[in-house]
Amino acid sequence: MDDITLGGYQPGGLASLCALQSKYYAREWGFDQRYEAVVSGNISEFLTRYDPQRDFIELVSQNEVIKGGIVIDSADGKIAQLHWFILHPDLQGSGMGTHLVSHAMAFVREKKYPKVHLSTFQGLNAARHIYEKAGFVLAEQKEAATWGRAVTEQRFEWASSAHS
């Protein structure tokens, strides 16, 4: 893994995560433009209120190209959401995903957020393994076609009380 660097917010970084996700989910899962529209809108909304004292961004770059990242979003400073976790296929299976989630959850513990949730869907087994290893538990699932294709959407939750 030559020239891998980790860093926080940088202009265009979250747009690059959106592009990585949009391409991956279109190619591998058949999601249409609605996915990119929703994610880019959510990223835009997040960036208007981004506060590094409350929110966490870690981006993975290789040779100055964004190859992945993760975000912890705490809009209210109390409950947090894990967002936009993705790695370029070149880095999948390298341990970098576990590293990103570990850093994000260290931030959660440092800020003493009592709960974190994330949304995903059934079939992303490698990511689910990483989430469960970090202490997330499946809280809810339902069939939906939010992204232009029917999937079983899932909500995972982590609570500090379960990890004290």
Image (cartoon, rainbow, N blue to C red):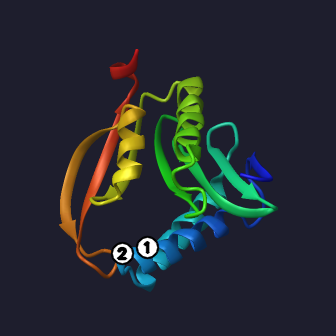
What amino acid is labelled 1 in the image?
Tyr
Question: Measured along the vertical axis of the image, is residue 88 above or below residue 148?
Answer: above
For the C terminus, the quadrant is top left
Whether residues under marks 1 and 2 lie with C-beta atoms below 8 angstroms apart, the answer is yes
As drawn, which residue projects farthest toward the bottom? Answer: 33
The residue closer to the viewer here, 132 or 112, is 132
Label 2: which secondary element: helix
Other residues around mark 1 within 10 Å, as few (<14) / some (14–19) / many (≥20): some
Quadrant of the image occupied by residue 135? top left
Classify residue 40 as left or right of residue 5.
left
Residue at (18% x, 60% y) in the render: 142
Question: Measured along the vertical axis of the image, is residue 151 above or below residue 71?
Answer: below
As drawn, which residue projects farthest toward the top? Answer: 164
Residue at (27% x, 59% y) in the render: 122
Q: Which residue is mark 1?
A: 25
Q: Which residue is mark 2?
A: 29
Image position, residue 133 (x, y; %): 39, 34
